[in-house]
Structure formats: C-alpha cells, structure tokens
Image (tube, rainbow, N blue to C red):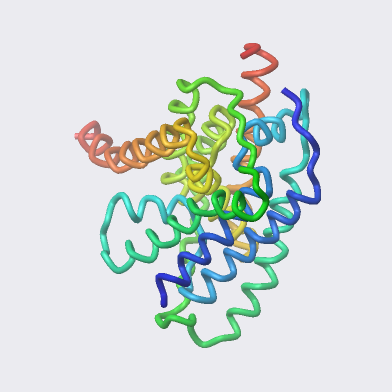
C-alpha cells in the first residue's frame, strides 16, 4: 500500500513533538518518554507522579479531537496489519521498550537531543531491526 | 496549574504526532520498507523534533529549576549492555510488526479505533512480562 510523501506535514509535526518535549522539561524537568509515562500510570509507585502523567496522557489523547475541531478532519490512520499482528507487535514493543529503557520518544527525540550515548546506541538498533522485520515480513514471507 | 500545564504539553506533543503521520502504521511501515513502497516522510519528524529539542533543552537548562519546582531529572545510567541493545532490538522488531510505537499509539487512541486500544493493552502486557522476568530468571538459576 503506497502512502503519500509528506515532508512539510511531517517536519511541522516533528517541530511540535520537539516543542512538547521541551515544554515538559521546562515545566516539570522530565524527559518525554512515552514508555515511562505509560508504565508510570499502570504500575503506580507514586501518586503525585501518576497525576501529571495522567494529565499528559489525557492531553495526548485529546489531540486528534482538537485537530478535528480546527480542520474538520480526523488525522488519517490506516492499519495494513491484522489484529493478531497488532497484539504480537504490541507485546514485543512493551517488553523491548521496558528492557531497553525507552522507545522512539525517550531514546529517539529526548536521548539524541541530549547526545546520550545509550540513545545513540538504542536508536540505530531499533531502526535497523524494524527495517529488517518489515523486509522479512513483506519481501521474504510475503505477508 | 501543574496538571493543566501537563495536559497542554500532552496536547502539543499529541498534535505534533497526529500531524506528522507517525501515528499512521501504513506510513510507519512504508518508512521502513526501503525495498518496497518506501515513504521517507518520517525522517522529517525525527529531524524536526531533535533540532527543536536539542536547542530548547539547552535554553531550558539555563534555569536553576523547572517552572513547577523540583529539579531537572535526567537519566544517569551510561551502561551499554545487553539489556539496552537486546531491549532496543526487540522494540524495533515489535514496531516493524505492528507499525505502532507507544508515543504514537497514545494520541492515536483519540481517533477511536479499537485496534489502537488493543495495541496499548498488548504493550502493557509486555511491560508486565518484563516485570515478571527477573523472578523467572532467578528461579531458573536456582
């Protein structure tokens, strides 16, 4: 399935993602890592910490609705994979992100910006395994 | 105020995710499909986000403390070990299978698609699996 090349929208979205990461550092002094934020509200170890994480997640979930109010259209989302693959991928993502202490937002956006050596190792690693996985599924097994 | 600030921050981040295209698994999988229907758009998401964060962090760190008190809390670990590499490798495999990552799936939940909720529940199951691992491994060792 082809998708349109969207350099302007993707760059604009990326600038806002970066702004979100900077705002969280400015306001609360924290890294914007989705894995840490999500696990912090599921496995509550500190109620005060859980409250700002819940507010952050609520804002994230409301974002597509805000875009709908402004533009009159929901952001596009098409799923080229089966629900079974969504579940299998999800479990591996959760296990991997918690073992590796971060995901695209934590290691990718925030870690690279801090020039963290761990993130400089983590990002090429997950980019490479994602590309290999897509290659195997699409071009070797023909899924 | 702190919670309102966190809500607005989530809104800015989530709007960026939604506009960027990274919450659309079709675009994510095509970004990685260099040998097929390659769509390089998402390189612009990471590029834009890292440039803003790189500059913004350095401006913010000129302050003594965050706006709402406390101190700046940055990861202190520097270990390059099997957990970091193996965990990141697994994360990439899962991302390549499902097309979602956690930071994209949370805003995607706002579109109301049930598959997104399914993905996030599976991610939480993966977190739980990780929390079970140490006890399983230590039992296996005895």
Q: Residue at x 30, y 69 (%)?
A: A48
Q: For the N terminus of chain A, give its image quadrant.
A: top right
Residue A119 appears in view:
no
- Compared to B48, does B1 lie above or below? below
Q: Look at the image and tell me in which quarter the C terminus of chain A lies.
A: top right
Residue drawn 49% across the image and 34% down it:
B113
- The residue sitting at the bottom extreme is B64
Residue found 33% across the figure and 54% down from its top = A41
Residue B10 position in % (x across, y down): 51, 60
Q: Is residue B56 above or below residue B126?
A: below
**Do we see residue A106 in this rendering?**
yes
The reply, left or right, for residue A73 in relation to residue B3 is right
Q: Is residue B22 left or right of residue A40?
A: right
Residue B60 percent coordinates (x, y)? 60, 79
Q: Nearer the viewer, residue A74 or A7?
A: A74
Q: Nearer the viewer, residue A14 or B75?
A: A14
Residue B126, given in percent of the width and then of the height, sits at 38, 37
> Which residue corresponds to the image point at 60% horizontal and 49% vertical from the top-left?
A68
Taking A41 as reference, is B12 left or right?
right
Viewed as shown, does residue A71 lie left or right of B69? right
Residue B84 pos. (x, y %): 49, 47
* Total labels drawn: 0
């Amino acid at each position: 399935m082809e998708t349109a090349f969207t350099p302007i929208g993707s760059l604009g979205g990326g600038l806002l993602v970066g702004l979100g990461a900077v705002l969280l550092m400015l306001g609360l002094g924290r890294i914007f890592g989705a894995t840490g934020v999500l696990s912090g509200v599921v496995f509550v170890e500190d109620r005060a910490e859980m409250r700002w994480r819940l507010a952050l997640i609520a804002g994230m979930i409301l974002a597509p609705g805000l875009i709908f109010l402004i533009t009159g259209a929901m952001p596009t989302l098409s799923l080229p994979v089966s629900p079974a693959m969504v579940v299998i991928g999800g479990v591996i993502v959760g296990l991997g992100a918690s073992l590796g202490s971060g995901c695209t937002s934590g290691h990718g956006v925030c870690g690279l910006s801090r020039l963290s050596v761990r993130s400089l190792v983590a990002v090429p690693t997950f980019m490479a395994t994602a590309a290999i996985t897509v290659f195997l599924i699409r071009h070797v097994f023909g899924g | 105020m702190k919670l309102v600030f966190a809500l607005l921050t989530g809104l800015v981040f989530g709007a960026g995710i939604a506009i960027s295209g990274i919450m659309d698994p079709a675009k994510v999988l095509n970004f990685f499909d260099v040998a097929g229907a390659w769509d390089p758009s998402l390189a612009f998401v990471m590029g834009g986000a890292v440039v803003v964060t790189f500059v913004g962090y350095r401006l913010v760190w000129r302050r003594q403390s965050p706006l709402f008190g406390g101190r700046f809390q940055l990861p202190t670990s520097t270990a390059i070990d099997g957990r970091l590499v193996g965990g990141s490798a697994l994360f990439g495999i899962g991302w390549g299978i499902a097309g979602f990552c956690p930071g994209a799936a949370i805003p995607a939940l706002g579109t109301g698609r049930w598959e997104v909720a399914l993905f996030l529940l599976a991610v939480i199951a993966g977190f739980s699996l990780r929390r079970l691992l140490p006890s399983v491994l230590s039992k296996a060792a005895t």
